[in-house]
Structure formats: structure tokens, C-alpha cells
Image (spheres, coloured by chain):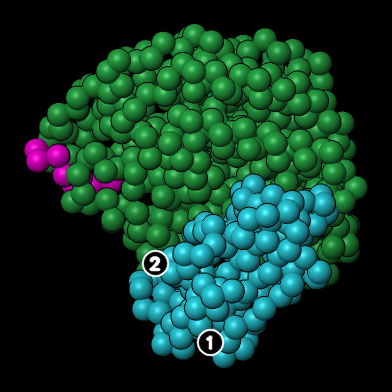
């Protein structure tokens, strides 16, 4: 069993970098950093892996809010994990569920984002959330 | 229905790459307004390229698209080599073709199975389809992965390959590395053949249009990386003449420039155009598969593009296997390219169709001007004309059915909206999402 951390985010889109930054600061897991949650996510895990995905999220909550989903158990909320790719992370997870290709455990951590404009201007509340998630994962 | 006003609006098209929308306004049977709307913000790649070194173009432009980075790399190196007056060896050309086969397999498989097939089978998405047809979707994922693996072995990385340079490759893979792909390619050829039969069995709306098909044509092979630009209406030009025959223009509802043939208007790019113009050069089993399902060059029902795409998956697998069998390590893996003050033009056949690049290089090897014309931009006119004509005989349909079929008609083109939106001259005040 491998503990696998997948951080999704665009480092050049301000708060959207959240997942990318978390994956960059955790060393106690096998880490993948992705700029987009595409279909290829499916290839990253094996059946007996313990997987955590961290991605930016928009649900209407305050920026910096941390949401935790047990994705092995339930579908992610529709539309909360934005992706301009035809297959975003939520769709890939549901496809994996349909094909019985989910890993042993799959937790998705969504960090609520505000400003996702071009550039590297992560807001302080999102940066705090990134730090908290990173520390918790590092020590988990 | 005469006189009844209806509006059909899809604010966010599903199962396409990028952010697009569609708007239709009907007055009875009369189409008052119809727009294929690309609202993803422009990405200003042409501006980023200015003052960068000519040698950086393949790596910068590869970032335009996660689905077809190889197309951007090859069109850009073709243009830079054209500007410098350099020809590369046959070995390098073959390796580029192999890399490109990986991209065709990956991109076409994604579209055929995961994005377009659900339309024909009545599923909202591949997720529900996978529940009923797990073996087919599992095979599709394996086929797609093979495309990614080819891109990794030849290109160094699957998403935005890093091994392509102006003049050749940083490092040519060994014969042994390529041979590791053979067993999977042999499996893929059988699977792709079954794919052709599967999709040819779908129900297709009764719809045809009289297109001008435009594609590259090469005298010796089914054109992918190189060739002259030809059409079924007599166009036959060198890539350097693109600007003499085509023009781009802005329409207010799209963040991507429209393209047209100066003399004849909209035109059609992509698998169906390539098949119409180059079918005789397909590999043996691909040609036979096309014949066996009754596909004839010049097929003009755009919904049947899914069959042609499947034929091209089979072709790309066979071609990759042939190229690996004939592979001799190119040594050196690149030719030195000295820049000079010149204009260079390059084109190649992206999975979605012809991708044209033009660069002005100054005497120091810096890019003074760049023009990138992606296939989805060029197909916008054709997409809108399809929709306009398609809807005329279907105004009796309820909104839900009509919307479904119109979305399907857009997906016929496998539009890559992210690719299309990187032109220069527009200001958009909008904060985007990834």
C-alpha cells in the first residue's frame, strides 16, 4: 500500500495554486503535482493505495475554508471542482467508481478559493489553509 | 410552430475541451440567430512569443494545449526550420511522425469513447456508459494510455513533451525503447479495428453538407507532419502561401478568430477532410476497416466523423508499428539551426485538423511576430453553418432533444476551445477559471 498525495492546481492562477502548493510542501507521501485534473489521474493510483487529492474548490464558502470528502464513499458535489478539461477530478473519480478502479481509500481535500486571476497572488486566507493542510498531511 | 419564438441556450458546453456555449433563436421555423460562442478568455500566446528566442517556440507553444501539444511543437519547428532554410533527416521526420501518432491515438481515443460516443448511445457522459459497458471503456483507457506512452517514450513526457527541438530531438530513443511498445501496439490494432465496427453501428442523424475539405497532402504518405495544403475544390498551395488564400477575422460573440478562404468562405478541417483527400494513403487494415463499414472518401455527414476518427486511430497504431519496425537511430538526433532574419511558415495535422504557424525572426534569432491558427478557430464557420442547416429541418423537435442533437453536432468537430482562444487583439474583462 502506498500513501499517495496528488496536488492539483495552476501555480500561475493565484488561489488556484492551492493543491499544487500543498503537494510541493509535503515530503512524507508519494507526491504527484498536476496542473489540471484530467483523465490521466486514473493512472496514478493502484487498487490498494491510500490516496489524498488536494484541489481548489468553489462552493460559495469563505476563501480558505477546507472541505474534506471521503470520495471512496460518496460522489463529490457537482460543479464545485472546476476544470475546463472535459474530465475534471470529480468526473475522473466517478469514472473510476463505475469501473471499480477506485483506490483502497480516497480522500479529497478541497480548499475554497477566491481570486484565481493570472499571476501568483495567493490570498492570505488561502495561504493559511494551504499551510494547515500541508502540516496535517506531513504529520499524518 | 410558425411564428412561435423559441430560444435555446447552452451556457456551458459539456464534453468539449475548454469553455464554450451555444445560442439559438428561432422564430417558428426561421433561425433568427445562431452562435457558437467561445467565451474562454484569450491567452495571448502570440504576444508571449515576441522577443523570445526562435528555439523556444516548440516548448512555449506546447503549453497551449494539454491534448495536442505535439501538433504545436511540430508546426512550430516546421516554421522555424522553414525560416532558417534547414531540412532535417528522414530519420528525424520519422521520429516526429511516430510522436504524432501517439498524440492522434491519445486524442482521438479520448474523443471517440469518452466525449462523443455517449451522444450516440444516449448516455449523459462516459461515467454512466462505463457502468453499462465497463470492458469497452477499460479498453479505451488502455488505448489512450498507449498514446500517452508513445509520447513519453519519444517526447520525454506525456502531457507537454520536452524532447522536441528546432532541428530534431534533444535525444533520440533507442531501438530497444521503441520495441517495448510493439506488443501493446499489436493489441491496439485489433482493438482499434473493433472500435471502427462499434462506432459504425451507431445511428446517425440524416444530414449532409457540401464542404470544402482542407488538409495537408504528402506525395508519399498519409500527411501528418508535412505536406502541401490542398482541398477538394482545387486549392493546392505551399504552406508559405497560407496568408494569400486564408484570412482571419473577429466576430463579437467569440474570443477566437474565425478563418475563411478568401474566395469561398468557410471550410472543413479534421479527420473527415484528411480522409476525403488522402484516403488512398491509409495503412492496409485502416483502409480495409473503412471499406468494410462502407465509409467512402468524401463522406459529408459530419456525425460520421466519429467513424473516420476511429479509422485514424487504427491507422496511427499501424503506422506507429511500421515506423518502429523501420527505425534506425538518427545520429545526430538534430541538425544545427542557425537563425536568420526571415519569415517561416509551418503546418501539421493536429488531431482536429490543420494547425498553421507563422513567425518573423530577426537577425538575432528573436521572434518579432507570431501567428498561430488552430483548427478549432478555423472550423468555427463550418460549425455554425452545420448548426444553422441542421436546425432547419428539426424545428419540430422539443427543446431538450434539439439541444442534445445540436451539442452533438458541435462535438462532431472535437473542438478544443482552449487552443482556439489565444489570439491577440481583444480585451476581455473577465476572471477565468482553470
Mark 2, residues whose alpha carbon is within 10 Å: few (<14), some, or many (≥20)?
some
Task: Classify B377 as above or below B29.
Answer: above
- Quadrant of the drawing holding the N terminus of chain B: bottom right
Dot 1 crowding, Cα within 10 Å, few <14, some 14–19, many 20+: many
Taking depth in this image into account, of B49 and A136 the one nearest to the observer is A136
Asked whether the beta carbons under mark 1 and mark 2 sit within 8 Å of each other, the answer is no
Query: On the picture, is B109 further left or further right than B371?
Result: right
Q: Quadrant of residue B187?
A: top right
* Residue B369 among those drawn in magenta: yes
Please state the horizontal and vertical placement of residue B297, each as a whole percent of the image: 68, 20
Question: Label 2, on which residue?
Answer: A12
- Callout 1: helix, strand or loop? loop
Is residue B16 in sight in this rendering?
Answer: no
Which is more toward the observer, B45 or B407? B45
As drawn, is B36 to the left or to the right of B99?
right
Q: Which residue is mark 1?
A: A63
Image height check: is B114 above or below B318?
A: below
Chain under callout 1: A
Q: Residue at x 82, y 21 (%)?
A: B293
Q: Looking at the image, which residue is at 41% across and 87% down? A: A124
Amino acid at each position: 500500500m502506498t500513501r499517495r498525495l496528488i496536488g492539483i492546481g495552476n501555480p500561475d492562477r493565484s488561489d488556484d495554486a492551492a493543491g499544487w502548493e500543498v503537494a510541493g510542501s509535503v515530503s512524507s507521501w508519494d507526491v504527484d503535482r498536476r496542473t489540471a485534473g484530467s483523465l490521466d489521474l486514473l493512472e496514478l493510483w493502484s487498487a490498494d493505495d491510500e490516496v489524498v487529492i488536494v484541489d481548489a474548490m468553489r462552493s460559495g464558502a469563505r476563501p480558505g475554508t477546507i472541505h474534506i470528502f471521503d470520495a471512496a464513499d460518496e460522489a463529490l458535489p457537482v460543479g464545485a471542482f472546476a476544470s475546463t478539461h472535459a474530465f475534471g477530478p470529480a468526473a475522473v473519480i466517478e469514472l473510476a467508481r463505475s469501473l471499480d478502479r477506485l483506490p483502497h481509500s480516497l480522500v479529497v481535500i478541497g480548499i475554497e478559493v477566491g481570486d484565481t486571476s493570472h499571476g501568483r497572488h495567493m490570498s492570505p486566507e488561502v495561504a493559511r489553509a494551504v499551510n494547515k493542510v500541508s502540516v496535517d498531511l506531513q504529520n499524518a | 410552430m410558425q411564428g412561435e419564438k423559441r430560444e435555446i441556450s447552452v451556457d456551458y458546453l459539456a464534453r468539449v475541451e475548454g469553455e464554450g456555449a451555444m445560442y439559438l433563436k428561432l422564430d417558428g421555423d426561421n433561425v433568427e440567430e445562431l452562435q457558437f460562442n467561445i467565451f474562454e478568455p484569450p491567452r495571448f500566446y502570440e504576444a508571449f512569443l515576441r522577443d523570445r528566442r526562435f528555439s523556444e517556440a516548440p516548448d512555449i507553444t506546447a503549453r497551449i494545449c494539454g491534448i495536442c501539444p505535439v501538433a504545436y511543437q511540430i508546426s512550430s519547428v516546421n516554421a522555424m526550420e522553414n525560416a532558417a532554410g534547414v531540412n532535417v533527416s528522414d530519420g528525424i521526420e520519422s521520429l516526429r511522425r511516430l510522436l504524432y501518432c501517439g498524440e492522434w491515438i491519445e486524442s482521438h481515443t479520448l474523443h471517440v469513447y469518452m466525449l462523443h460516443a455517449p451522444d450516440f448511445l444516449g448516455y449523459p457522459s462516459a461515467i454512466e456508459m462505463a457502468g453499462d459497458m465497463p470492458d469497452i471503456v477499460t479498453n479505451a483507457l488502455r488505448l489512450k494510455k498507449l498514446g500517452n506512452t508513445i509520447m513519453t517514450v519519444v517526447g520525454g513526457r506525456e502531457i507537454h513533451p520536452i524532447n522536441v527541438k528546432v532541428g530534431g530531438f534533444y535525444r533520440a530513443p533507442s531501438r530497444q525503447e521503441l520495441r517495448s511498445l510493439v506488443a501493446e501496439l499489436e493489441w491496439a490494432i485489433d482493438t482499434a479495428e473493433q472500435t471502427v465496427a462499434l462506432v459504425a453501428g451507431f445511428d446517425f442523424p440524416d444530414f449532409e453538407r457540401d464542404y470544402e475539405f482542407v488538409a495537408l497532402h504528402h506525395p508519399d504518405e498519409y500527411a501528418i507532419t508535412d505536406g502541401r495544403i490542398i482541398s477538394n475544390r482545387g486549392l493546392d498551395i505551399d504552406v508559405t502561401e497560407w496568408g494569400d488564400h486564408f484570412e482571419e477575422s473577429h466576430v463579437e460573440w467569440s474570443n477566437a478568430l474565425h478563418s475563411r478562404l478568401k474566395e469561398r468562405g468557410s471550410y472543413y478541417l479534421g479527420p473527415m477532410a484528411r480522409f476525403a483527400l488522402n484516403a488512398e494513403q491509409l495503412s492496409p487494415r485502416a483502409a480495409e476497416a473503412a471499406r468494410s463499414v462502407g465509409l467512402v472518401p468524401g463522406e459529408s455527414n459530419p456525425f460520421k466523423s466519429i467513424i473516420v476518427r476511429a479509422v485514424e486511430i487504427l491507422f496511427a497504431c499501424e503506422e506507429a508499428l511500421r515506423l518502429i519496425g523501420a527505425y534506425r537511430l538518427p545520429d545526430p538526433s538534430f541538425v544545427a539551426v542557425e537563425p536568420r532574419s526571415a519569415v517561416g511558415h509551418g503546418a501539421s495535422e493536429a488531431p482536429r485538423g490543420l494547425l498553421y504557424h507563422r513567425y518573423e525572426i530577426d537577425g538575432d534569432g528573436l521572434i518579432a511576430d507570431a501567428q498561430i491558427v488552430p483548427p478549432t478557430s478555423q472550423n468555427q464557420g463550418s460549425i455554425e453553418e452545420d448548426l444553422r442547416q441542421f436546425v432547419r429541418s428539426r424545428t419540430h423537435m422539443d427543446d431538450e432533444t434539439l439541444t442534445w442533437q445540436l451539442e452533438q453536432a458541435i462535438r462532431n468537430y472535437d473542438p478544443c476551445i482552449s487552443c482556439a482562444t489565444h489570439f491577440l487583439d481583444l480585451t476581455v474583462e473577465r476572471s477565468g477559471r482553470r
